[in-house]
Every structure is written in C-alpha cells, then in structure tokens.
C-alpha cells in the first residue's frame, strides 16, 4: 500500500487505530489546542492529541451552547464532545487561543456537570499574547502549574529528565517534518501539499514514537518524481484552522502545487526546536512563545511577514492563498493586513472565507481557479518583462 494511503487512513478518522491500540493497552490520551506544550503531556505519560473536527457532519448540538457568530471549528468540535465522539480522551487541555476556544472550556465544564460528558480532567492553560522576557517567565510558570496538575491527576512525577526525554522525541519529530518540507523547496517538488496536510493530521494524533517511525517511512518513500507540472504555479497557503484536505486538493486541481504554508497543522507545528541543553521548562517557554506564530500573538506581525517574504523567496512562491473561517476575528484582521502588504509589495494574494466542512465548495473552487489563472498570467508577464530587460 502507498504510504500516503496509510497516512490517509489515520488522518481520516478522529479516533484512529493507533489510539485504539494504545487505549486497549491502558494508554491515556489528552486532547489539546494549539500552543500547549505537548512535551509536558507526554512526560506525564499521556498521548497528546491535537483537537480536530475530522469526520464531523454537523453542529446542531454544538449550536445549543454556541452562538451562530462563533466559528465552525469550535461548534463542530464541541458538537462532537456532546455526542460522545471524544469519549476516548482522558483529559482536554484548553488554551486561550481566541475567545471562541476559550469559551469551550466553560461550555465543556457546564456540559460535564449537567450531561456528564467526559473526560473529568479539563484544564485551561494560559498562554500570554505577547512575546517578551516577562511573558516567557509567565509561560514557564504556567508550565510548572500545569505539570503539577497533571502529576496529581495521573500520578507521574514530571522530572526534568522525563521532560528532556519528551523534548528530544518531539525535536526529532520536528526535524523529520522539516526534512520532508525541504523536498517541496525545489522546482521539481516531490510531495503534494494535500499529502502533507494529511501527514500532519496523522502525526498529531498518534503516540510520538510511532509518529516518528511513520515520518521516517514517509521520508524514505518519497522518490525523485516531481508532482509539479510545467504549467503549475507554486502556492503558499496560510490562515486559521484548516483541516480539510479537500481544500488543498481543489488548489492542486487548478494547475497549482502547494509547496509551503503558515498553518497550525503545518509550519507552526514544527517550527523551531526546543533547546536541549538548558532548563527544560525555560527552554519550552522560549520555544512556544518564539516559534512561528498566528495572529493571537499581538507583537509578531513583522516576524510573520518576514517568514512570508523569506518563504516566497526560498520556495519560489508565485501566489499566496489565505483562508479564514467566518467569524474568526484574529484571522479577519490578519487578512486585511496581508491584503495591504500584497498591495504594497505586489505578491498575488487570494483571501478566502469559509465554513469548516461547509457548503459553497463550488464557489470556492471558482474563486481559486480564477485567482490561479490571474497569478499565472502575472508570472508570464513578469518573465516576459525580465527577458526583455
Ligand atoms: S478559526 Fe479563528 S475563531 Fe475559530 S478557533 Fe481558530 S482562531 Fe479561534
């Protein structure tokens, strides 16, 4: 079987066979939202599971708790929780990423009291919104508090040695993903963006050692055959909560290859290793605050733009697609700023708004097709102007 078929089977289910086997053998799983240090969860003896809505078919139950003005990621996720779709979790670690996810903590606790939904260990991990020395100290304090709560609940004393062991495993994972991303840098890109998103969905829902083994097999299986055709333009995709592989496939179906991203299930997951030589808690705090950010970090827009321009240059990007869910304020503001940058420096940009697993795919496809055609024409005009010069 093709390795990406195996990956697709893992990523296509909220509860995959690796998690089932782990549970059957007494393993424990902790769901988490972004910017929670997975190393701490792992050091406590639990499998970190990146929360997702994969396979969700509706939000009717979630809508009882949420307003229609909340994003569909949170409504789908909470809908699943209410239907028992997260009953395999032994803990859920929330994070103040945005007000929509923050509210899920309150809703989950309330539903636990009134409807007895699982699990019983619900924890709010507070992450500062600013990157500076004071906030790194604050984040380190939050890690210590979190470690204490996990230790008390699950009975493992999280020592520095255990943390360092977890840091090494996740650093290895970051290096393996980065190595696979490198294969998208050259003009003859050898791995599809849709397979990369599937890979990220899979490895964030597996025991880390098994995920690292899978990544090594993926790396070894990627040959020299280019998936890029001559007419294809090279796209970077950015934005908030994106887990639908079909969106990337639509782009790929329009004579384009997705070769880079700034996504939470993408570059933001593996960017920057944790220093293995210093105090593990402080090193974790530095990495989680200084890595490639999303717009919840309010003093990092310039750093995100630097990443964007560097990637445009090194990955020879022809066009940028940014996408956000309806009612996502954070990415709404970011996209306006990106549009301003696109006008200022001239990179082609398409800003999409959508619902998670929503309708309107046909309309999205039409917009993507038209944009890629326009970007291709701009590229041809640029090349013609360069050859005349
Ligand atoms: S899509 Fe936006 S509003 Fe929804 S959870 Fe993500 S950051 Fe929050």
Image (tube, rainbow, N blue to C red):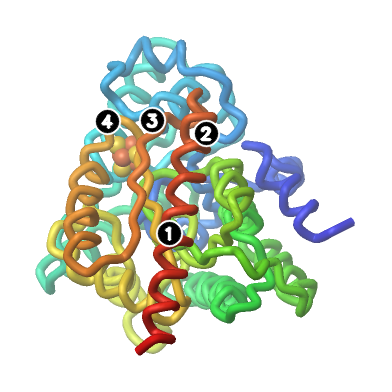
Instruction: Give the labeled residue for mark 4.
Output: 327
Q: Residue at x 43, y 77 (%)?
A: 384
Which numbered dot is residue 53?
2
Query: Which percent across, then down, holds residue 290?
Result: 27, 71
Q: Measure the alpha-carbon separation of dots 3 and 2.
A: 8 Å
- Please rate how many residues cluster around mark 4, counting C-alpha atoms within 10 Å: few if below 14, some from 14 to 19, many from 20: some
Reply above or below: 180 against 89: below
Query: Viewed as shown, does residue 12 lie left or right of 350?
Result: right
Disc 4 C-beta below 8 A from ligand 1: yes
Determine crowd level at label 1: few under 14, some 14-19, many 20+ residues with C-alpha closer than 10 A.
Answer: many
Gap between marks 3 and 4 measured at Cα: 11 Å
Look at discs 4 and 2 and give the one toward the viewer: 4
Residue placed under numbered mark 1 in the picture: 375
Q: How far apart in space, not on screen, are marks 1 and 3 (Cα)? A: 33 Å
CB under 8 Å between discs 3 and 2:
no
Residue 231 placement, left or right of 374? right
Q: Earlier in the sequence, mark 1 or mark 3?
A: 3
- Considering depth in this image, is 320 or 95 the residue closer to the camera? 320
Q: Which residue is painted at 57% across and 58% down in the image?
A: 256
Identify the secondary structure beneath mark 1: helix
Q: Quadrant of residue 208?
A: bottom right
């Amino acid at each position: 079987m093709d390795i990406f078929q195996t990956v697709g089977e893992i990523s296509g289910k909220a509860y995959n066979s690796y998690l089932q086997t782990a549970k059957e053998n007494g393993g424990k799983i902790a769901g988490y939202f972004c910017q929670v240090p997975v190393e701490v969860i792992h050091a406590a003896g639990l499998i970190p599971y990146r929360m997702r809505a994969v396979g969700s078919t509706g939000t009717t139950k979630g809508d009882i708790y949420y307003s229609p003005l909340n994003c569909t990621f949170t409504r789908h996720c909470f809908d699943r929780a209410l239907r028992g779709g997260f009953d395999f979790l032994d803990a859920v670690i929330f994070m103040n990423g945005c007000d929509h996810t923050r509210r899920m903590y309150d809703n989950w606790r309330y539903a636990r009291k009134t409807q007895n939904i699982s699990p019983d260990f619900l924890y709010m991990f507070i992450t500062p919104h600013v990157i500076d020395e004071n906030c790194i100290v604050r984040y380190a304090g939050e890690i210590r508090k979190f470690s204490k709560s996990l230790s008390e609940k699950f009975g493992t004393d999280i020592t520095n040695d255990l943390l360092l062991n977890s840091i090494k495993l996740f650093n290895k994972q970051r290096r393996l993903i980065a190595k696979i991303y490198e294969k998208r840098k050259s003009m003859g890109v050898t791995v599809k963006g849709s397979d990369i998103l599937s890979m990220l969905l899979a490895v964030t829902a597996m025991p880390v050692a098994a995920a690292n083994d899978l990544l090594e097999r993926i790396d070894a299986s990627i040959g020299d055959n280019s998936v890029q055709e001559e007419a294809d333009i090279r796209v970077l995709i950015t934005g908030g909560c994106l887990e639908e592989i079909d969106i990337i496939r639509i782009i790929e179906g329009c004579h384009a290859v997705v070769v880079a991203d700034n996504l939470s299930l993408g570059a933001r997951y593996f960017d920057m290793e944790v220093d293995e030589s210093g105090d593990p808690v402080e090193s974790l705090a530095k990495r989680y605050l200084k890595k490639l950010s999303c717009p919840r970090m309010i003093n990092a827009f310039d750093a995100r733009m630097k990443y964007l321009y560097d990637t445009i240059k090194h990955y020879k990007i022809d066009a940028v697609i940014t996408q956000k869910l309806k009612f996502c304020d954070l990415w709404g503001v970011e996209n306006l700023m990106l549009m301003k940058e696109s006008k200022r420096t001239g990179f082609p940009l398409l800003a999409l708004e959508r619902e998670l697993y929503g309708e309107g795919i046909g309309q999205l496809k039409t917009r993507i097709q038209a944009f890629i055609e326009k970007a291709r024409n701009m590229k041809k005009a640029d090349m013609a102007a360069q050859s005349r010069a």
